[in-house]
Amino acid sequence: MKFLLIFDFDHTVIDENSDTWIMKCAPEKNLPNELKDTYEKGKWNEYMGRVFKYLGDKGIREYEMKRTMTEIPFTEGMIELITFVGKNKDIFDCIIISDSNTVFIDWILGTAKVRDVFDEVFTNPAAFNDHGYLTVEGVHVHRCDKCPKNLCKRKVLVEFIDKQLQKGMKYAKIIYLGDGENDFCPITSLKKNDVAMPRKGYFLHKLISQLPQDASLEPSVVVWSSASEILSYLKLLIKNDS
């Protein structure tokens, strides 16, 4: 049986937020306050649609956006971790579940030559339209009141595991790497043998730390600061499993 690794993207695979990083393309590397003020909680995707329209209106084109996005830094040790997973695909399946978008993730992973390591990427579909403007859609429709309306990561994860089960793939252990508020919902679907790995000091870590004792999570919790710590954990996991 294989292990399943689930990666968040922003502040997990990369050490920044891809949606806020793209704003470096804006005039004076900033957005006007009247645009910023249109954001409503839980509706980030719609807000980013307006940001992309603004960038398009200002004449920012695909090549400029790609150049900016491919300068984004990976989290410390992350390329080594992904490379290790890629060399051990007989042991690991790995997917990304992210509230970024397909264009940004493909650019960033493609430039680093690690896109092929990931079996699937679940994120907001994005594309450039006939006018050269980047457009973005939501991942799916869901009924979870804890998640932004364009994406419930738990729904994605549960559906992926069910699909794999139908193919005869049952995972020995599921390991979830994340940092943010929207990573809490999916880790509540993990079982006793699984592992939730929140990034130290980030929102997910704080949420888990503040849980009352009677509401503790089923999976074990392993906190990380750099991807080299995750790599050490995986190497130990393989050693103990062999």
Image (cartoon, grey):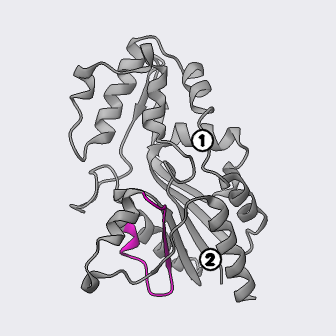
Quarter of the figure with the C terminus: bottom right
Residue at figure coordinates x 29%, y 34% from the top left: 47
108 vs 13, nearest the viewer: 13
**Mark 1 — residue?**
106
**Mark 2 — residue?**
3
Which stretch did the figure color magenta? 186-201
Residue at figure coordinates x 44%, y 26% from the top left: 23
Numbered label tally: 2
Label 1 Cα neighbours within 10 Å, binned few <14 / some 14-19 / many ≥20 = some
- The image shows residue 119, relative to residue 51, as above or below, that is below
Q: Position of residue 89 (x, y in %)?
A: 73, 68
Residue flagged by tag 1: what amino acid is it?
Asp
Label 1 vs label 2: CA separation?
24 Å
> Left or right: 228 with respect to 20?
right
Label 2 Cα neighbours within 10 Å, binned few <14 / some 14-19 / many ≥20 = many
> Left or right: 61 with respect to 46?
right
- The image shows residue 39, relative to residue 98, as above or below, that is above
Which of the 4 image quadrants contains residue 3?
Answer: bottom right
Question: Mainly helix, strand or loop, the magenta region?
Answer: loop
Which of the 4 image quadrants contains residue 55?
Answer: top left
Q: Position of residue 138 (x, y in %)?
A: 35, 45
Residue at figure coordinates x 70%, y 49% from the top left: 114
Quarter of the figure with the N terminus: bottom right
Residue flagged by tag 2: what amino acid is it?
Phe
